[in-house]
Image (cartoon, rainbow, N blue to C red):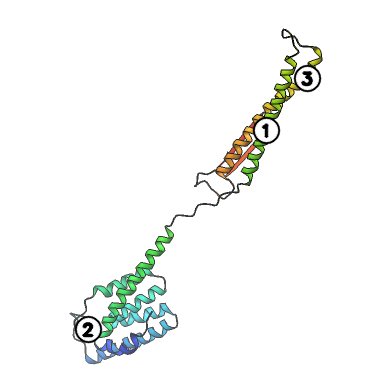
Amino acid sequence: MRLRWLFPFATAFLFTLAPPAGAAEPRASSVQDKRALALEHAHQGLDAYREGRFEEAYEHFREAQALFPAPTLLVHMARCQRRLGKVVEAKALYEEVLAQPLPKNAPPPFVEARHDAERELSEMEAKLAAEKKVTERPAPAPPRGSIVPGVITLGLGAVGLGVGTVTGALSMAKVSDIRSRCQDEHCVSADRAAADQARTLGHVSTAAFVVGGAAAAAGVLLLVLRPGGGADKTTGAAKDLRVSVGIGRAEFELRY
Protein backbone atom coordinates (compact mmCIF):
# COMPACT_ATOMS: atom_id res chain seq x y z
CA MET A 1 0.00 0.00 0.00
CA ARG A 2 1.33 3.45 -0.88
CA LEU A 3 0.94 6.23 1.68
CA ARG A 4 2.61 9.01 -0.26
CA TRP A 5 -0.66 10.39 -1.67
CA LEU A 6 -1.54 12.09 1.63
CA PHE A 7 1.79 13.77 2.27
CA PRO A 8 2.11 16.23 -0.63
CA PHE A 9 -1.60 16.62 -1.29
CA ALA A 10 -3.32 16.38 2.12
CA THR A 11 -3.93 20.11 2.28
CA ALA A 12 -4.39 20.50 -1.47
CA PHE A 13 -7.25 18.05 -1.85
CA LEU A 14 -9.19 19.59 1.03
CA PHE A 15 -9.00 23.10 -0.35
CA THR A 16 -9.91 22.04 -3.88
CA LEU A 17 -13.22 20.53 -2.80
CA ALA A 18 -16.50 22.32 -3.00
CA PRO A 19 -19.56 21.65 -0.83
CA PRO A 20 -21.96 18.98 -2.13
CA ALA A 21 -24.11 20.05 -5.05
CA GLY A 22 -27.46 21.51 -4.05
CA ALA A 23 -26.29 22.42 -0.56
CA ALA A 24 -26.66 25.94 0.76
CA GLU A 25 -23.56 28.06 0.48
CA PRO A 26 -21.87 27.76 3.89
CA ARG A 27 -20.32 30.63 5.73
CA ALA A 28 -16.60 31.07 5.17
CA SER A 29 -15.80 30.27 8.77
CA SER A 30 -17.87 27.08 8.57
CA VAL A 31 -16.02 25.94 5.45
CA GLN A 32 -12.65 26.65 7.02
CA ASP A 33 -13.65 24.79 10.17
CA LYS A 34 -14.76 21.74 8.20
CA ARG A 35 -11.58 21.77 6.17
CA ALA A 36 -9.46 21.99 9.27
CA LEU A 37 -11.37 19.17 10.97
CA ALA A 38 -11.25 17.00 7.85
CA LEU A 39 -7.52 17.57 7.53
CA GLU A 40 -7.04 16.65 11.19
CA HIS A 41 -8.96 13.40 10.70
CA ALA A 42 -6.95 12.66 7.56
CA HIS A 43 -3.63 13.06 9.40
CA GLN A 44 -4.85 10.99 12.36
CA GLY A 45 -6.03 8.32 9.97
CA LEU A 46 -2.67 8.26 8.26
CA ASP A 47 -0.86 7.88 11.60
CA ALA A 48 -3.16 5.06 12.68
CA TYR A 49 -2.77 3.32 9.30
CA ARG A 50 1.02 3.51 9.53
CA GLU A 51 0.88 1.90 13.00
CA GLY A 52 -1.42 -0.90 11.87
CA ARG A 53 -4.55 0.37 13.65
CA PHE A 54 -6.71 -0.09 10.60
CA GLU A 55 -10.13 0.13 12.25
CA GLU A 56 -9.20 3.43 13.86
CA ALA A 57 -7.67 4.66 10.62
CA TYR A 58 -10.82 3.77 8.73
CA GLU A 59 -12.99 5.75 11.12
CA HIS A 60 -10.79 8.83 10.77
CA PHE A 61 -10.84 8.61 6.97
CA ARG A 62 -14.61 8.11 7.07
CA GLU A 63 -15.04 11.21 9.22
CA ALA A 64 -12.90 13.22 6.84
CA GLN A 65 -14.87 11.86 3.86
CA ALA A 66 -18.14 12.91 5.51
CA LEU A 67 -16.83 16.47 5.93
CA PHE A 68 -15.23 16.89 2.50
CA PRO A 69 -15.67 13.95 0.09
CA ALA A 70 -12.57 12.99 -1.90
CA PRO A 71 -11.55 9.90 -3.93
CA THR A 72 -8.23 9.89 -2.08
CA LEU A 73 -10.06 9.25 1.18
CA LEU A 74 -12.24 6.54 -0.37
CA VAL A 75 -9.17 4.72 -1.68
CA HIS A 76 -7.56 4.71 1.73
CA MET A 77 -10.81 3.61 3.36
CA ALA A 78 -10.80 0.67 0.92
CA ARG A 79 -7.20 -0.14 1.86
CA CYS A 80 -8.15 -0.23 5.54
CA GLN A 81 -11.00 -2.62 4.80
CA ARG A 82 -8.67 -4.87 2.80
CA ARG A 83 -6.24 -5.02 5.70
CA LEU A 84 -9.15 -5.94 7.98
CA GLY A 85 -10.15 -8.75 5.64
CA LYS A 86 -13.41 -7.06 4.60
CA VAL A 87 -13.05 -7.64 0.88
CA VAL A 88 -16.71 -6.97 0.05
CA GLU A 89 -16.61 -3.55 1.71
CA ALA A 90 -13.25 -2.75 0.11
CA LYS A 91 -14.54 -3.72 -3.32
CA ALA A 92 -17.57 -1.44 -2.89
CA LEU A 93 -15.34 1.51 -1.97
CA TYR A 94 -13.04 0.97 -4.94
CA GLU A 95 -16.05 0.76 -7.24
CA GLU A 96 -17.42 3.96 -5.73
CA VAL A 97 -14.21 5.76 -6.68
CA LEU A 98 -14.37 4.42 -10.23
CA ALA A 99 -18.06 5.32 -10.55
CA GLN A 100 -17.43 9.00 -9.82
CA PRO A 101 -16.51 10.97 -12.95
CA LEU A 102 -13.52 13.28 -12.60
CA PRO A 103 -13.63 16.78 -14.07
CA LYS A 104 -11.02 17.70 -16.66
CA ASN A 105 -9.31 20.02 -14.20
CA ALA A 106 -9.22 17.42 -11.38
CA PRO A 107 -6.16 17.79 -9.14
CA PRO A 108 -3.38 15.22 -9.58
CA PRO A 109 -4.13 13.45 -6.25
CA PHE A 110 -7.66 12.69 -7.44
CA VAL A 111 -6.43 11.34 -10.79
CA GLU A 112 -3.85 9.19 -9.05
CA ALA A 113 -6.46 7.94 -6.55
CA ARG A 114 -8.64 6.78 -9.44
CA HIS A 115 -5.71 4.93 -11.03
CA ASP A 116 -4.85 3.34 -7.68
CA ALA A 117 -8.45 2.23 -7.18
CA GLU A 118 -8.54 0.61 -10.61
CA ARG A 119 -5.23 -1.17 -10.12
CA GLU A 120 -5.83 -2.32 -6.55
CA LEU A 121 -9.35 -3.54 -7.34
CA SER A 122 -7.96 -5.59 -10.21
CA GLU A 123 -5.25 -7.06 -7.96
CA MET A 124 -7.79 -7.90 -5.27
CA GLU A 125 -10.16 -9.62 -7.69
CA ALA A 126 -7.31 -11.62 -9.23
CA LYS A 127 -6.20 -12.79 -5.79
CA LEU A 128 -9.75 -13.79 -4.83
CA ALA A 129 -10.15 -15.71 -8.09
CA ALA A 130 -6.86 -17.56 -7.48
CA GLU A 131 -7.88 -18.46 -3.92
CA LYS A 132 -11.25 -19.71 -5.14
CA LYS A 133 -9.54 -21.85 -7.76
CA VAL A 134 -7.30 -23.40 -5.11
CA THR A 135 -10.25 -24.23 -2.84
CA GLU A 136 -12.15 -25.80 -5.72
CA ARG A 137 -9.22 -27.97 -6.76
CA PRO A 138 -10.15 -31.68 -6.41
CA ALA A 139 -8.67 -33.45 -3.45
CA PRO A 140 -5.68 -35.67 -4.21
CA ALA A 141 -6.32 -39.38 -4.52
CA PRO A 142 -5.80 -41.23 -1.23
CA PRO A 143 -2.57 -43.20 -0.97
CA ARG A 144 -2.80 -46.86 -1.86
CA GLY A 145 -1.73 -49.66 0.42
CA SER A 146 1.36 -51.82 0.14
CA ILE A 147 1.67 -54.57 -2.48
CA VAL A 148 3.44 -56.85 0.03
CA PRO A 149 0.26 -58.61 1.31
CA GLY A 150 -0.81 -59.29 -2.27
CA VAL A 151 2.59 -60.66 -3.25
CA ILE A 152 2.73 -62.93 -0.19
CA THR A 153 -0.80 -64.22 -0.70
CA LEU A 154 -0.16 -64.79 -4.39
CA GLY A 155 3.00 -66.72 -3.47
CA LEU A 156 1.07 -68.88 -1.05
CA GLY A 157 -1.46 -69.57 -3.77
CA ALA A 158 1.32 -70.66 -6.13
CA VAL A 159 2.68 -72.99 -3.43
CA GLY A 160 -0.78 -74.45 -2.87
CA LEU A 161 -1.31 -75.07 -6.57
CA GLY A 162 2.14 -76.65 -6.75
CA VAL A 163 1.38 -78.98 -3.85
CA GLY A 164 -1.94 -79.89 -5.45
CA THR A 165 -0.22 -80.71 -8.73
CA VAL A 166 2.48 -82.87 -7.11
CA THR A 167 0.16 -84.79 -4.78
CA GLY A 168 -2.33 -85.28 -7.58
CA ALA A 169 0.35 -86.72 -9.81
CA LEU A 170 1.52 -89.07 -7.02
CA SER A 171 -2.06 -90.19 -6.37
CA MET A 172 -2.65 -90.91 -10.03
CA ALA A 173 0.64 -92.79 -10.26
CA LYS A 174 -0.25 -95.04 -7.31
CA VAL A 175 -3.75 -95.67 -8.69
CA SER A 176 -2.26 -96.62 -12.06
CA ASP A 177 0.23 -98.95 -10.37
CA ILE A 178 -2.50 -100.66 -8.34
CA ARG A 179 -4.77 -101.11 -11.36
CA SER A 180 -1.94 -102.75 -13.28
CA ARG A 181 -2.08 -105.64 -10.83
CA CYS A 182 -5.86 -105.91 -10.67
CA GLN A 183 -7.83 -108.48 -12.66
CA ASP A 184 -11.49 -107.97 -13.55
CA GLU A 185 -11.76 -105.06 -11.13
CA HIS A 186 -10.49 -107.27 -8.32
CA CYS A 187 -7.29 -106.09 -6.69
CA VAL A 188 -5.01 -107.93 -4.40
CA SER A 189 -5.35 -107.29 -0.68
CA ALA A 190 -1.67 -106.41 -0.43
CA ASP A 191 -2.38 -103.15 -2.32
CA ARG A 192 -4.92 -101.96 0.25
CA ALA A 193 -2.37 -99.75 2.02
CA ALA A 194 -1.23 -98.31 -1.32
CA ALA A 195 -4.88 -97.58 -2.21
CA ASP A 196 -5.35 -95.72 1.07
CA GLN A 197 -2.23 -93.67 0.35
CA ALA A 198 -3.51 -92.87 -3.14
CA ARG A 199 -6.85 -91.83 -1.70
CA THR A 200 -5.17 -89.60 0.90
CA LEU A 201 -2.96 -88.01 -1.76
CA GLY A 202 -6.06 -87.34 -3.82
CA HIS A 203 -7.76 -85.56 -0.94
CA VAL A 204 -4.63 -83.52 -0.26
CA SER A 205 -4.39 -82.62 -3.92
CA THR A 206 -8.01 -81.48 -4.02
CA ALA A 207 -7.63 -79.39 -0.86
CA ALA A 208 -4.35 -77.89 -2.07
CA PHE A 209 -5.94 -76.90 -5.38
CA VAL A 210 -8.89 -75.27 -3.57
CA VAL A 211 -6.72 -73.40 -1.09
CA GLY A 212 -4.06 -72.54 -3.67
CA GLY A 213 -6.64 -71.26 -6.14
CA ALA A 214 -8.35 -69.18 -3.48
CA ALA A 215 -5.04 -67.74 -2.27
CA ALA A 216 -4.01 -66.93 -5.83
CA ALA A 217 -7.30 -65.15 -6.47
CA ALA A 218 -6.97 -63.27 -3.18
CA GLY A 219 -3.42 -62.28 -4.05
CA VAL A 220 -4.51 -60.85 -7.40
CA LEU A 221 -7.34 -58.99 -5.65
CA LEU A 222 -4.94 -57.55 -3.07
CA LEU A 223 -2.56 -56.39 -5.77
CA VAL A 224 -5.38 -54.62 -7.62
CA LEU A 225 -7.16 -53.03 -4.64
CA ARG A 226 -4.17 -52.57 -2.33
CA PRO A 227 -6.33 -51.85 0.76
CA GLY A 228 -5.10 -50.09 3.87
CA GLY A 229 -3.86 -46.94 2.11
CA GLY A 230 -6.45 -44.57 3.55
CA ALA A 231 -9.28 -45.07 1.08
CA ASP A 232 -12.70 -44.19 2.45
CA LYS A 233 -16.31 -44.64 1.48
CA THR A 234 -16.27 -41.76 -0.97
CA THR A 235 -13.68 -43.45 -3.17
CA GLY A 236 -15.66 -46.66 -3.60
CA ALA A 237 -12.48 -48.69 -3.07
CA ALA A 238 -12.22 -51.55 -0.63
CA LYS A 239 -10.96 -50.38 2.72
CA ASP A 240 -10.19 -53.79 4.19
CA LEU A 241 -9.95 -57.29 2.78
CA ARG A 242 -9.88 -60.46 4.85
CA VAL A 243 -9.11 -63.91 3.47
CA SER A 244 -9.70 -67.14 5.36
CA VAL A 245 -8.52 -70.42 3.85
CA GLY A 246 -8.46 -73.96 5.15
CA ILE A 247 -8.57 -77.57 4.03
CA GLY A 248 -11.11 -77.71 1.24
CA ARG A 249 -12.49 -74.21 1.86
CA ALA A 250 -11.78 -70.55 1.14
CA GLU A 251 -13.59 -67.44 2.37
CA PHE A 252 -13.29 -63.79 1.31
CA GLU A 253 -14.60 -60.75 3.16
CA LEU A 254 -14.43 -57.22 1.68
CA ARG A 255 -15.14 -54.26 3.96
CA TYR A 256 -15.92 -50.76 2.59
Label 2 secondary element:
loop
The count of marks equals 3
Mark number, residue 106: 2
Q: Earlier in the sequence, mark 2 or mark 1?
A: 2
According to the image, label 3 marks what residue?
A: 194
Q: CA distance from mark 3 to mark 1?
A: 23 Å
Q: Earlier in the sequence, mark 3 or mark 1?
A: 1
Q: Residues within 10 Å of mark 3 (few under 14, many from 20)?
A: some
Mark number, residue 162: 1
Mark in the foreground, 2 or 1? 1
**Vertical placement of 142 versus 73: above or below?**
above
Percent x, y of residue 7: 34, 88
Give the residue type at disc 1.
Answer: Gly
Please identify the residue farthest to the front as the structure is shown.
Answer: 180
- Residue contact at pointers 3 and 1, CB within 8 angstroms: no
In front: 114, or 159?
Answer: 159
